[in-house]
Amino acid sequence: GGEGQCLAFYSYKDIEKLEKFLSKKTVSERELGTALLNEMVSYAETSISRRKFILHYFGEDFNVEDDLQKMDDNLRFPKDKMDASKELLFLLNIIINTNQKLKTKELVKIIVGDSNSLINSYDLQKMSFFDKGLSKDRSFWNSLISQASISGFIKKNIENYGIIKLNDKGFEYLKNQNPFIIYLDNRKDNVIENFTLKSSINDHNLREILLELRKKVADKSKIPPYTVFQDASINDMTFKYPINMQEMKNIYGVGESKAKKYGIEFIKVIEEYVNNNNILRGEEHIVRTTGSNSTLKLYLIQSIDRKLPLPDIAFAKGMSMEALLSEAETIVYSGTKLNIDYWLNEVFDEDQQEELHDYFLDSETDDINDAISEFDGEFDEDEIRLYRLKFLSEVAN
């Protein structure tokens, strides 16, 4: 065949859309999917040879000097270089001093002085290296981690959700340093964003009816509508048309207790809608919970009942704090109460808890990004998710 050319189009909004799809997966699937998405982001935004990058991902090495045709855009139009030997040594020491148990996200947060509940729980904000990388921005440190991995100093364990550890070459570098030349990452200038994301909701008319019913139920109980059923749960109802309690329990984010508490009114409305509109329902929309997920759920509930520190619970199961919060959210959204007051009192003072409670009580949505924006950075994502668990346990369940 003849010569072909490949043009790849990339926007981070595509990644955000995929992240929303992942939110419906189990914790292990979500963590693995997120790690793979992060690899795709690194590939799209890298300034090194894309051929070298992708071959490294599949366990192969590639010498860019062998690419005489320079068909790779980053080789044809090379970016600026710099010697990052000092920065690499700094990074490797942090990985060692944090026991090689953090992902890129947490490492970058520590380097630039950004904290979250996981970092606070291990008192990493008190370490000497905290915020000592502020002279460089986040994109630089993300790029350094990526290029250090490709150069063999560190490895990302994808099967362990992206946990970063040192390779033998990394340990050797701690003893003997040589120049480490890196390419500075692409700037995100002139990004074209002229498309819109369309909803994947199956039945818009039914959705409007269910949203109106949800608001009616919420007003009657004097609680925010999202605490009755999540938007994702409403959307799933418009796809599966549950007309009995067993089917309602199989709706995303609806467990047995929430189905019993709110499900009857919704079932009646959906059944009437199905009959009036002669809708043929699918019979194969069945969600099964694996034994491993049930075991994890039980372990998490029992550990919280015993008031074990949340980071210790996560560590015992080899999970990140983010993964633990996701699993706890699945439990709470399904109608099971989790009393995490003992841990919240370690993270927030009384005034902060009252402030967060009032926000979620008055808000029309429990969207984390909206909350972060409302508090203007006073709380990070993990902290807001942590308090949301308490609020939903008390108000929704």
Image (cartoon, rainbow, N blue to C red):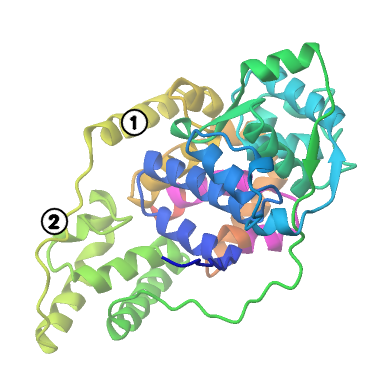
Residue density around tag 1, few if under 14, some if 14–19, many if 20 or more, within 10 Å: some
Look at the numbered disc 2 and give the secondary structure of its residue.
Answer: helix
Q: CA distance from mark 1 to mark 2?
A: 23 Å
Q: Residue at 16% across / 55% down in the picture?
A: 286
Locate residue 100: give its quadrant: top right
Q: Is residue 348 visible?
A: no
Q: From the viewer's perspective, tell me whether residue 170 is left or right of residue 325.
A: right
74 shown above or below 216: above
Report the span colored magenta. Answer: 370-393
**Label annotation for residue 296:** 1
- Disc 1 residue type (three-letter): Leu
Foreground tag (1 vs 2): 1
Locate residue 8: give its quadrant: bottom right
200 shown above or below 319: below
377 in magenta: yes
123 in magenta: no
Q: Residue at 23% across / 38% down in the picture?
A: 290
**Label annotation for residue 246:** 2
Question: Does label 1 or label 2 sit earlier along the sequence?
Answer: 2
